[in-house]
């Protein structure tokens, strides 16, 4: 029988990339999101469901009969609004509801793959991190992400689900899906500033590093986990390129690519003092060793940073209905 895979958060930046990747496989695919989403083309038998998953009944309907569920929900505004009750409901409450509705339905425990965050560890105690470190999240967002992961792990131990958490690095890239969210991360934010002719500013001296992975490589990690889940179930696994790219170099690359696409001179990249409210995690470098996940699945990032930045800039400068994408 053809496997039923359900993606929760299918119109999000990562969710839409995962949905596109799964659509190329011979599966039954259910893409669930809050907004209308054009079904991606491919071999999959795809059904698009528009639903508010904070409604428990709607959630139960959305996941009914699923062999595997990919959980990629994120409150509007992301980590910036995590302190609100509405954000906590999406980031954590829906995971609790999901476990409850699956338990009430009975039957064979479905596979649930959760999109966590490498930042759940808090201030990195070392470089690189590999997932064996103790978690000490310092922001409301990371606390909610860790709490949701813990709910999933407990449900796995209780035999209700077969849970896997994939902790994501700094994800960037373009999003061609109609109706899907565009990337609001640091690379695209700087590309939009460069497109507007604004200088690119970095907190500190520019030597802080981030482990940047293109969104299509992240989608490939989810499909790899779906293909070989058994050894992954019950654990959390870090995804990363292992490079640790200095933000000053990344921003200069963005400025150069935007200049190449627009024919203008590159905007300046300048360092500024970080604001007093900056989280400690923003001022510390992060490099990720994803060897444990790679050894099990064979996954590894394929898109280089220069190629990923080029594609991101090209997408932002491609006219849509006569205007650049924003």
Image (cartoon, rainbow, N blue to C red):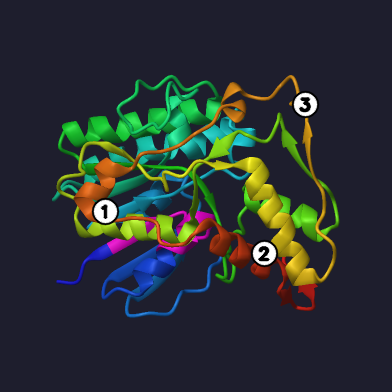
Residue at 31% over, 60% down: 223
Give the side of residue 32 with respect to residue 209, left or right.
left
Q: Quadrant of the C terminus?
A: bottom right
- For label 1, count other residues whose C-alpha is less than 10 Å away and answer few (under 14), some (14-19) or many (20+): many
Q: Quadrant of the N terminus?
A: bottom left
Q: Nearer the viewer, residue 219 or 124?
A: 124
- For label 2, count other residues whose C-alpha is less than 10 Å away and answer few (under 14), some (14-19) or many (20+): many
Residue wearing tag 1: 225
The answer to whether the residue labelled 3 contacts the one labelled 1, judged by CB atoms less than 8 Å apart, is no
Residue wearing tag 3: 273
When asked about the image quadrant of residue 314, the answer is bottom right
Foreground label between 1 and 2:
2
Secondary structure, mark 3, is: loop
**Could you tell me if residue 50 is visible in this image?**
no
- For label 3, count other residues whose C-alpha is less than 10 Å away and answer few (under 14), some (14-19) or many (20+): few
| Residue interval drawn in magenta | 5-18
In terms of sequence position, does the residue under pointer 2 or pointer 3 come before the other? 3
Give the side of residue 249 with respect to residue 172, left or right.
right
Give the CA distance from mark 2 to mark 3: 27 Å
Question: In the image, is residue 35 above or below residue 1?
Answer: above
- Locate residue 19, reporting x and y percent: 42, 65
Give the CA distance from mark 3 to mark 1: 41 Å
In terms of sequence position, does the residue under pointer 3 or pointer 1 come before the other? 1
Q: How many marks?
A: 3
The answer to whether the residue labelled 2 contacts the one labelled 3, judged by CB atoms less than 8 Å apart, is no
Q: Nearer the viewer, residue 169 or 307?
A: 307
When asked about the image quadrant of residue 305, the answer is bottom right
When asked about the image quadrant of residue 92, the answer is top left
- Locate residue 262, reporting x and y percent: 79, 70
**Could you tell me if residue 6 is visible in this image?**
yes
Residue wearing tag 2: 313
- Locate residue 44, reporting x and y percent: 32, 76
């Amino acid at each position: 029988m053809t496997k039923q895979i359900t993606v929760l958060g299918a119109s999000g930046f990562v969710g839409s990339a995962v949905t596109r990747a799964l659509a190329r496989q011979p599966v039954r695919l259910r893409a669930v999101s809050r907004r209308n989403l054009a079904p991606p083309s491919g071999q999959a038998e795809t059904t698009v469901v528009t639903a508010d998953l904070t409604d428990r009944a709607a959630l139960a309907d959305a996941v009914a009969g699923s062999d595997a569920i990919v959980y990629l929900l994120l409150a509007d505004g992301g980590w910036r609004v995590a302190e609100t009750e509405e954000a906590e409901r999406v980031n954590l409450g829906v995971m609790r509801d999901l476990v409850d509705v699956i338990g009430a339905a009975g039957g064979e425990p479905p596979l649930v793959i959760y999109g966590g965050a490498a930042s759940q560890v808090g201030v990195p105690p070392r470089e690189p991190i590999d997932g064996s470190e103790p978690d000490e999240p310092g922001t409301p967002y990371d606390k909610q992400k860790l709490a949701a992961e813990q709910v999933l792990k407990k449900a796995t131990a209780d035999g209700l689900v077969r849970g896997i958490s994939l902790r994501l690095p700094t994800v960037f890239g373009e999003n061609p899906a109609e109706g899907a969210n565009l990337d609001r991360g640091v690379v695209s934010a700087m590309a939009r500033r460069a497109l507007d002719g604004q200088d690119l500013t970095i907190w500190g001296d520019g030597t802080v590093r981030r482990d940047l992975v293109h969104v299509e490589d992240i989608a490939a990690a989810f499909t790899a986990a779906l293909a070989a889940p058994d050894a992954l179930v019950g654990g959390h696994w870090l995804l990363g390129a292992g490079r640790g790219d200095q933000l000053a170099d990344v921003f200069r690359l963005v400025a150069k690519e935007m200049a190449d696409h627009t024919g203008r001179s590159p905007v300046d990249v300048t360092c500024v003092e970080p604001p007093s409210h900056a989280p400690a995690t923003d001022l510390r470098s992060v490099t990720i060793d994803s060897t444990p996940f790679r050894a099990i699945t064979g996954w590894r990032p394929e898109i280089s940073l220069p190629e990923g930045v080029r594609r991101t800039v090209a997408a932002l400068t491609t006219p849509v209905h006569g205007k650049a994408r924003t």
